[in-house]
Image (cartoon, rainbow, N blue to C red):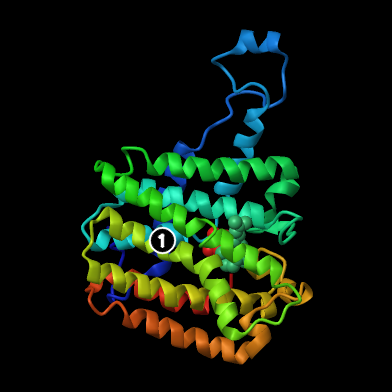
Amino acid sequence: MIKIVKDDDNFDLQAALSDVSELLDATMDELLPRPTASSSIISLEDRNQVEGECHVGGEGRVMEAMRYSALSGGKRLRPFLTLTCASLFGVSREASIYTAAAIEFIHTYSLIHDDLPAMDDDDLRRGKPSCHIQFDEATAILAGDALQTLAFQLLADREAHPDPSVRCELVRSVARAAGCSGMVGGQMLDLYSENQELSVDEIIRLQRLKTGEMFAISCEAGAILGKAPDKQRKALHRYAHDMGLAFQITDDRLDAEGTREETGKEVNKDDKRGKATLIGAMGVDWAREQGQILARQAIGHLSCFDKKADGLRALADYVVTRRS
Ligand code: GRG
């Protein structure tokens, strides 16, 4: 359970996020395959000599790329949500970290693919060269693919939960959230919205799919692990929906008024690419105000939870005030 509190009893979100990051990074480091020798392609003859010692045939390269992107920082908001939501139902951090890592691997894959020239074409991610810049396009595509398959392998593993029906529910729910009716669908809409006039409702739907579904499953996964009652699950779903939209509106606002140094990525890209965003439709001031309203609304959905949900409350405030 995440239980970092300040002396004045206000939840210390930064301490809790770095606590989660530390545990998550150690877990991901263990779970990610590790190239054990040179990743260069070697001959079959040589392969026979070194079998068992190294990943031959160059697959070490894709492993390096997976590790490069997954272990490159990031706010780790989704794992924080999974761990915190699981803790509401008595599930320990140790019992939920596997699932949290799987979700972060899917998030990492989406960032790698999003940065590719065929998509958002970004050279910078988390203040470092994007995966396809550091390696190459083919390696970045494969690293994303392999992170996604690794995620489902983990969710199906007994370590994720001893009850197979819980594991099945995790696999099904994460697949739905990440797939064509969730994140991938939202990304498709986003790519084809360039230079199109979209209504506010259409933009909100796009953002709910592209970003909101992964936030929702991050919360839901905690509820699944804890076999939570329906009422609490619904409350968390509503929280995630409003918090996710507040997050996305802020993301768009940071793109419009943030700096490359603050955000660790290129800014002003939405405008340059003619992307349909709520900033474009309604303006920066509206976005700031709407973000605050959504954050308050998200917190309102948590009334059925006690102080254990303070991390979720603090996160809703944070997503609209963050600068990166
Ligand atoms: C390629 C299938 C596919 C989907 C891409 C995640 C995504 C969908 C696109 C990323 C582009 C983007 C800016 C999306 C808006 C919100 C978002 C997901 C931002 C990145 O999430 P953070 O801020 O990232 O949590 P960190 O680096 O902190 O993990």
Tell me the residue at 60%/46% (across/down): 144
Q: Horizontal placement of 167 versus 191: left or right?
A: left
Q: Quadrant of residue 13?
A: bottom left
Q: How many marks?
A: 1
Q: Whole-percent x and y of residue 2?
A: 30, 60
Tell me the residue at 63%/90% (across/down): 282
Q: Is residue 308 visible?
A: no
Task: Classify mark 1: residues with Cα within 10 Å, few (<14), some (14-19) or many (20+).
Answer: many
Decide: is 80 above or below 134. Answer: below
Q: Whole-percent x and y of residue 258?
A: 66, 76
Q: Whole-percent x and y of residue 217?
A: 41, 61
Decide: is 244 above or below 135. Answer: below
Q: Horizontal placement of 263 versus 207: left or right?
A: right
Q: Which residue type carries mark 1?
A: Ile
Query: Is the C-beta of the residue carrying label 1 under 8 Å from the nearest atom of ligand 1?
Result: no
Q: Horizontal placement of 312 versus 28: left or right?
A: left
Q: Whole-percent x and y of residue 173?
A: 39, 55
Q: Quadrant of residue 236?
A: bottom left
Residue at the right extreme?
Answer: 272
Decide: is 148 above or below 207. Answer: above
Q: In terms of depth relative to the viewer, which is nearer, 1 or 299?
A: 299
Report the residue marked by disc 1.
217
Q: Quadrant of the C terminus?
A: bottom right
Q: Horizontal placement of 40 versus 293: left or right?
A: right
Q: Quadrant of residue 115?
A: bottom right
Q: Is residue 262 visible?
A: yes
Element assignment for label 1: helix
